[in-house]
Image (tube, rainbow, N blue to C red):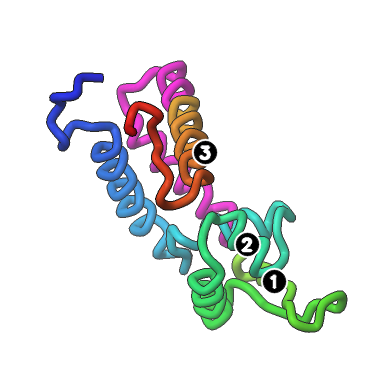
């Protein structure tokens, strides 16, 4: 990659613009279901049995515990989740989807998938698959860099 590339055409900037565009599209399409784009990782994790506590959900969604607690409180208020004391740990709660959330999730998912297809108009199926694979690799690289922790140099080329 050229060192002289305009900062506005770097992968980081373009991915940020794409992410905001997808978020706007998704928010608009999810609003009729009472969901927000930030709810998706929670809804999917609970639906698929990948998480059942606030700690598990925060880890799955890659967010810190305080924002997850706030989101769960809003989702509970809005009737999307219910929290019950964890019988194995009195300090923890189990989180589950409500019937309302479960009944809306399939159609909301279908609407989001259509939004993704609409956004990828003009891409061949192979290009769309390659794009997703490239984004997954990019995310893995970013996760590795983040695991190095703050204050550590990301490039061995920097003294």
Is the residue under label 1 in contact with that under label 2 (CB below 8 Å)?
Answer: yes
Residue 144: give its label: 3
Q: Would residue 145 be found to the left or right of residue 14 on screen?
A: right
Q: Is residue 51 above or below residue 6?
A: below
Could you say whether the residue bearing mark 1 is in a helix, strand or loop? strand
Q: Residue at x 41, y 19 (%)?
A: 127
| x then y, percent, for residue 105 | 58, 57
| Residue under label 2 | 57
| x then y, percent, for residue 140 | 52, 35
Q: Would residue 111 be found to the left or right of residue 97 on screen?
A: left
For residue 76, which quarter of the picture?
Answer: bottom right
Q: Would residue 2 be found to the left or right of residue 159 on screen?
A: left
| Viewer-side residue, 75 vs 144 | 144
**Looking at the image, is mark 1 or mark 3 nearer the viewer?**
3
Q: Residue at x 50, y 77 (%)?
A: 70
- Per the rendered image, the range of residues in magenta is 103-131
Q: CA distance from mark 2 to mark 1?
A: 9 Å
Q: Is residue 103 above or below residue 72?
A: above
- First in sequence, mark 3 or 2: give its number: 2
Q: CA distance from mark 3 to mark 2?
A: 20 Å
Does residue 123 show up magenta in the picture?
A: yes
Does residue 60 show up magenta in the picture?
A: no
| Residue under label 1 | 95
Counting other residues with Cα less than 10 Å from the Cα at mark 1, is it few (<14), some (14-19), or many (20 or more)? many
What's the magenta bit mostly, secondary-structure-wise?
Answer: helix
Q: Residue at x 30, y 54 (%)?
A: 24
**Looking at the image, is mark 3 or mark 2 nearer the viewer?**
3
Q: Residue at x 23, y 32 (%)?
A: 10
| x then y, percent, for residue 71 | 50, 72
| x then y, percent, for residue 82 | 67, 77
> Which quarter of the figure is the C terminus placed in?
top left
């Amino acid at each position: 990659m050229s060192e002289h590339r305009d900062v506005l055409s770097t992968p980081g900037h373009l991915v940020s613009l794409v992410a905001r565009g997808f978020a706007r599209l998704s928010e608009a399409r999810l609003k009729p279901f009472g969901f927000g784009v930030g709810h998706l990782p929670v809804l999917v994790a609970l639906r698929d049995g990948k998480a059942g506590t606030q700690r598990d959900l925060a880890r799955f969604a890659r967010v810190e515990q305080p924002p997850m607690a706030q989101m769960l409180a809003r989702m509970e208020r809005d009737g999307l989740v219910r929290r019950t004391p964890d019988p194995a740990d009195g300090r923890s709660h189990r989180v589950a989807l409500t019937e309302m959330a479960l009944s809306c999730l399939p159609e909301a998912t279908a609407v989001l998938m259509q939004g993704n297809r609409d956004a990828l108009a003009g891409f061949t199926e192979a290009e769309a698959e390659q794009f997703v694979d490239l984004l997954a690799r990019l995310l893995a690289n970013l996760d590795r860099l983040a695991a190095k922790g703050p204050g550590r140099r990301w490039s061995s080329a920097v003294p």
